[in-house]
Amino acid sequence: PSMNGLSAAVIYGANENRRQKDESEPRSDHVWGLGLNYGNGPIYIGYAYEQRADKSIDDNDEKTIGHLIGARYTLANSLGNTTVGVQWNRIKLEDLDNADEQHRTAWALSLSHAMGPHNIIAHFSKVGDRKGDGANSETGVKMWELGYNYSLSKRTMIKAYYVQIRNERNANYDFYTPIGSTSSEGVGGANSNNLYNGQDPRGFGLGVRHSF
């Protein structure tokens, strides 16, 4: 529902990843979330909450809880529209069997300027160390991104971007590791994309988007 710029949404995922006992890594999980948004002219503010239960068939019980707050302001001027955005989130992972808990926080800052068909984008994100039971230090990461979009028409756009990730000594985030995850994958070795702790991936891309 929406009223005077304020809207709300609720989601629920009903155990879609369930696997049976005779399958590898059997599990049973569900997720639910709540979103609140407010938009009024150049101002946008949003909050999201998500809770994910991950219970394996052999009764290994885990729960992930996430909070996300974001805000955006657009300033119109004679040179175009400048938009500033900020985001903060906190993810907590609970091992209900062993009464263990780990959490981490992250924040991001973005700046974009649109002028005619041109749009220049800059983005910076920082994920802090994991905290809690058994957590390692130096597990944070920083990411920079610069991008440029050019609209050929209302439906077609070309884009170019450059991204750099700076992992701390015990982190191995890459382009396929969600910044919202509680930890980098494979701490102590390579992750599923063969990135080792402390390595710093970077990338450059060109693309075309067309809306039909």
Image (cartoon, rainbow, N blue to C red):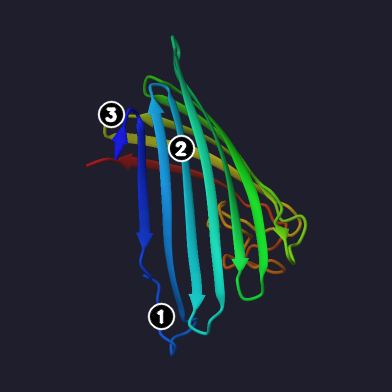
Q: Residues within 10 Å of mark 1 (few under 14, many from 20)?
A: some
Q: Secondary structure at mark 2?
A: strand
Residue that extends furthest to the bottom in the rendered view of this protein: 22
Q: CA distance from mark 1 to mark 3?
A: 47 Å
Q: Which residue is mark 3?
A: 153
Question: Earlier along the polypeptide chain: callout 2 or callout 3?
Answer: 2
Q: Identify the residue shown where x is 62% and y is 56%.
A: 173
Picture coordinates of residue 18, whole percent (x, y):
40, 76
What amino acid is at disc 1?
Answer: Arg
Picture coordinates of residue 47, whole percent (x, y):
48, 41
Going by the image, does 60 lie left or right of 171?
left
Position of residue 166 relative to residue 46, above or below, is below
Q: Identify the residue shown where x is 48% and y is 84%.
A: 24
Q: Tell us which disc is closer to us: 1 or 3.
A: 1
Q: CA distance from mark 2 to mark 1?
A: 35 Å
In this view, the residue in front, 58 or 180, is: 58
Quadrant hosting residue 6:
top left
Q: Residues within 10 Å of mark 2 (few under 14, many from 20)?
A: some
Please tell me the numbered disc located at residue 19: 1
Q: Tell us which disc is closer to us: 2 or 3.
A: 2
Q: Secondary structure at mark 1?
A: loop
What amino acid is at disc 2?
Answer: Gly
- Position of the C terminus, as image quadrant, is top left
Q: Identify the residue shown where x is 71% and y is 61%.
A: 197
Q: Secondary structure at mark 3?
A: loop
Please tell me the numbered disc located at residue 46: 2
